[in-house]
Image (cartoon, grey):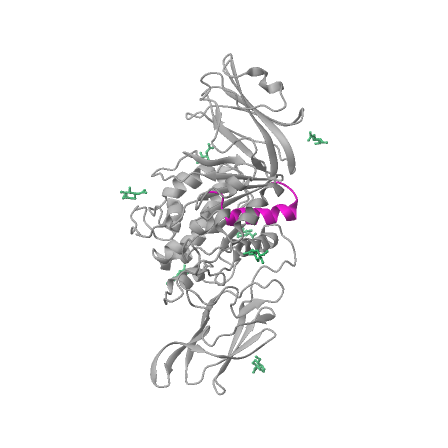
Amino acid sequence: MKLLHACQFLLLCYFICITDCASFRFASYYASHMVLQQKPSQAVIWGYGEVGAAVTVSLFNGSDTISKKSVPINDDAGVWKVLLDPVDHGGPYWLLAQQRYQKDITDLALHDLLFGDVWLCSGQSNMEMTVSQVFNASEELAKAADYPTIRLFTAALEVSLEELDDLAKVDLQWSAPTPENLGNGEFTYFSAVCWLFGRHLSRRLKYPIGLVESVWGGTPVEAWSSKRALQKCGLSQHMECASSRSMYAGPCNYTVLWNAMIHPLLNMTIKGAIWYQGEQNTGMNTDLYNCTFPALIEDWRLSFHEGTNGQTDRYFPFGFVQLSTYQKSQQNDNYPVIRWHQTADYGYAPNPKMNNTFMAVAMDLGDDNSPYGCVHPRDKQTVAYRLYLGARAIAYGEKNVPFQGPFPTKFEIFYKESYINITYDQKLLITHLSDSIFEVLCDSKDETVGGWFPVPVTSACSNVVTVYFKGCSQISGIRYAWEDWPCEYKKCPIYSIQKKLPAPLFVEYFKK
Ligand SMILES: *[C@@H]1O[C@H](CO)[C@@H](O)[C@H](O)[C@H]1NC(C)=O
Ligand SMILES: *[C@@H]1O[C@H](CO)[C@@H](O)[C@H](O)[C@H]1NC(C)=O
Ligand SMILES: *[C@@H]1O[C@H](CO)[C@@H](O)[C@H](O)[C@H]1NC(C)=O
Ligand SMILES: *[C@@H]1O[C@H](CO)[C@@H](O)[C@H](O)[C@H]1NC(C)=O
Ligand SMILES: *[C@@H]1O[C@H](CO)[C@@H](O)[C@H](O)[C@H]1NC(C)=O
Ligand SMILES: *[C@@H]1O[C@H](CO)[C@@H](O)[C@H](O)[C@H]1NC(C)=O
Ligand SMILES: CC(=O)N[C@H]1CO[C@H](CO)[C@@H](O)[C@@H]1O
């Protein structure tokens, strides 16, 4: 007998190994204090054991057995995997996994398990910024104790050339939030965007929320993509990437983070994912991002669905942050291009190529005094709030939750009077109008060569904005906020009335 067997009769029971029971274990991310996905999904529990053994997994509430499942281990790698019965949100529960191998019985137990919704948080450094790096950090950290039913987990930074079945290392094992684990230094754990998003969900839903952070700063989308996803966009599996000299750059080889930091998680049932990434792709495969990002979403969805035997929704909700700002003084088109490509060139989410997605616009949250560099704005509260509105509408199906900023639906060009009326899908809150945020593409202007020219807004009322384009005889396009840093903090010209959500950038080309 390898484990203290009496353990199973105790209410609270820890993993007590007497001798070498290393061969029977849970996968790295099963631990006491974790949150498992609630019904109607079934949570997956898996681990490793002796080939030829039988494993029984029981879930208890007090002394009542809620679910009991047995499986033989007949996989060469010794992998066992069970699906618990669907469990309503709440807890605490405890779980006993028992391996019977010939005459040996080995028990492993987890306690203080909660059921609720599990969200995966991924991306690069803006997702990695910890709660101690955001505005009002000390106040935010002090609130940790108010959310004992949110639980945190952080995967370690690892790369691999092969798909790993389990995480090589864990940085933060499942824990209740504390000021220490929410603010463990800079760019470690815990992700401020992930935490603040989870906090909104917890307050709204009033049941446990599990947050799984798997993030690495300065990484391109290709590193987080499987070979299958990259192939869809014509990218070879070649691992090459241009090395960046930025102090924030992480690994950029194709698939290495998918292999080490996402593939191992595929057998965990999740509710959805949020993603804040794209900065690194302003310098790598920028023009392909309208393919690589939608392909990643589709591939993650299919892979989690398969990895959990269908228990993770095939089209699970996927929220993302549209890039904030980087350089105020430079005209760098790659930021607006990536913002546009983040929406598969529709400008908004969800859209026909990205269903069940939601987007938080952040181009109005620039922070040129950020001690972590301008690319890391400190207002993550607003980002998380905007994501949360999207989650309510898309992930939780709440009706009448405004979660999108205004977007144009109609353009009318009046050549004789030299103006364009732009009709938006909702009433506008207009502030801080500038004469350069709208631009038109002129074939030629005042006898000079063509190009994009700023046009002033002459009137704006209700849901119509009028721009004046004198001197331009033929217009073939119009765009809004097509700049790296289009406006000052919370001072973009156009917001929605109800929730003060910024109008995202757009570009529209007119057919001749
Ligand atoms: C166990 O579950 C039952 C119903 O499923 C519930 O009435 C009871 O309060 C639970 N006990 C504990 C200790 O949570
Ligand atoms: C990236 O790929 C190159 C070339 O195959 C290799 O030398 C390097 O070690 C890889 N780096 C990482 C972080 O995987
Ligand atoms: C993506 O954008 C590029 C230009 O940046 C364009 O050439 C290409 O057709 C677009 N691809 C898709 C799939 O929309
Ligand atoms: C998303 O699109 C797929 C087909 O591409 C469809 O089967 C599925 O029902 C859609 N999901 C939602 C929520 O619209
Ligand atoms: C920081 O706290 C102040 C005072 O409560 C508040 O006005 C401000 O909105 C907070 N900032 C953020 C980004 O939440
Ligand atoms: C264009 O929009 C303005 C309001 O911005 C409105 O006064 C004007 O009537 C519109 N023009 C046409 C032809 O609809
Ligand atoms: C342990 C285990 O079942 N791992 C599986 C997780 O999901 C992936 C993707 O479906 C499988 O390839 C693994 O075998």
Which residue appears farthest toward the top when viewing the image? Answer: 103
* Most distant residue in the bottom direction: 416
Q: Residue at x 48, y 39 (%)?
A: 154
Above or below, 70 relative to 40: above
Magenta residues, dominant SS class: helix
Instruction: Kindly identify the residue that appears in the image at 52 percent across and 17 percent down.
Output: 3
The region drawn magenta spans 189-208
Above or below, comparing residue 492 to residue 217 in the picture: below
Of 152 and 30, the residue lying toward us: 152
Q: Position of residue 267 (x, y in %)?
A: 49, 36
Residue in front for this viewpoint, 512 or 143: 143
Quarter of the C terminus within the rendering:
bottom left
Q: Is residue 342 magenta?
A: no
Q: Quadrant of ligand 5?
A: bottom right
List x then y, in percent, for residue 206. 66, 44
Q: Is residue 352 above or below residue 165?
A: below
Query: Is residue 511 visible to the viewer in this orientation of the structure?
Result: no
Spot occupied by residue 82 in the image (x, y as percentages of width and height): 54, 30
* Residue at the extreme front of the image, as rendered: 138
Q: Is residue 93 left or right of residue 246?
A: right
